[in-house]
Amino acid sequence: MRVAFLGKGGAGKTTTAAGFIQFMSERHPFVLAVDADVNAHLKSALNLQGEIKQLGLHFDKVTDYLRGERKDLGDRPMIGTTPPAKGSNFIYPKKDNHFIKEYALYERNIALLTVGTYQQEDVGGSCYHEKLKSLAGIFHHMLDNDDDVVIADTTAGTDNVATSLSFAYDINVFVLEPTEKSTQVYLDYKEIAPQFVERTYVVGNKVDGEEDAEYIKGRVGADKYLGSIPYSTYLKKFEQGDDDAINSFHKEQEAAFENVLKELKSRKRDWNEYMERLQKAYAWDCQRWYSDYYKQDLESGIDKTFRYEDVLSTKKTAMPV
Ligand SMILES: Nc1ncnc2c1ncn2[C@@H]1O[C@H](COP(=O)(O)OP(=O)(O)OP(=O)(O)O)[C@@H](O)[C@H]1O
Ligand SMILES: [Mg+2]
């Protein structure tokens, strides 16, 4: 199961994602956390101490790894939406997985992948979408099942709509403050991406009493509202160095998180639908930009018969890492 936390800048995405990662890490043997924000703060929000490896610096190597032994591509490059095929390497969100061991910071029972920020050579020449597209490639090669937990913190706004990350998560949770601007981000998303609204929910953050909660429900619809997290004085204490205060804050988040978990558990990913979306996104990317860019027809000739089930079924007997 995969969930992403979205919302306006400063609404509390990182704080809420970190809280949910902690919540799930107390209930599951292993949690894969993904920091997909250009301003990478998930590590400190989780109070992890080790060194992170910025995935953004290693995407060429990552892409080679995902490409594996596949023959159908010939000399075509892989882009973020290139659907996997026979010969691809896949990622299993497990502690001993090769990819996780290579790129994640592992502490407690949390593995943290960090896309990372811009480098000097990116200045004026690269946008974060390029990095997000590569991250999407990782998700499209991930074979998580219903017991695996993958939780992502994202960039502010509705950015994920612009990449194939838009369908990479089983549910999206918007973190909304009880203000017009904050709730507008969800309303804009609803307008731009109506096809994903069925998998999108809202958590109220910095909510001060029932009136605030009612305000958000009035804006987004009560059926979408999974619960409120209060404006917390414990969080400030934690950020001022009182490590124990975070536990009291986690208690304040618990009721909303129980509902997020319930929604996540009720989802069963349709892998065929996922593949259809991915193939469409790939065709669209090739036609719009990449075939031209690489001066090569990227679209024709690649294996379109591959189904995730082809590799998911082998996983039942022996778990490749
Ligand atoms: N429930 C809460 N109670 C009190 N303060 C909060 C709460 N949630 C978040 N904050 C504070 O709000 C600020 C922004 O939170 P956070 O960094 O999680 O937001 P964000 O949406 O990830 O921001 P960005 O868009 O910059 O990534 C932080 O100082 C955080 O401590
Ligand atoms: Mg953040």
Image (spheres, rainbow, N blue to C red):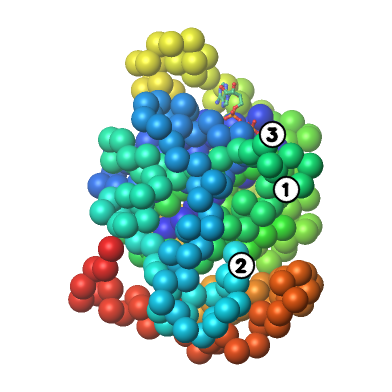
Which residue is rendered at x = 35% and y = 61% of the image? 92
Callout count = 3
Q: What residue type is labelled 1?
A: Cys
Question: How would you rate the neighbour count of disc 2 (Cα within 10 Å): few for under 14, some for 14-19, many for 20 or more?
Answer: some
How many angstroms separate mark 3 from mark 1 (CA)? 18 Å
Nearest to the observer: residue 175 or residue 41? 41
Ligand 1 within 8 Å of disc 3? The answer is yes
The answer to which of marks 3 and 2 sits earlier in the sequence is 3
**Residue 102 image position (x, y, % from top left):** 36, 50
Give the residue displayed 66% in from the left and 72% down from the top. Answer: 281
Task: Identify the residue position indicated by label 1 in the image.
Answer: 127
- What's the residue type where badge 2 is placed? Ile
At horizontal 63% and vertical 63% (from top left) the residue drawn is 164
Decide: few, some or many residues near mark 3? Use Cα within 10 Å; few <14, some 14-19, many ≥20: few
Secondary structure state at the residue bearing disc 1: loop
Q: Assess mark 1: CB under 8 A from ligand 1?
A: no
- Residue 110 drawn at (x, y percent): 34, 41
* SS assignment at label 3: loop
Q: Mark 3 points at which residue?
A: 9
- Tell me whether circle 3 and circle 1 mark residues in contact (CB < 8 Å): no
Question: Which residue in the structure is indicated by mark 2?
Answer: 79
39 versus 218 height, above or below:
above
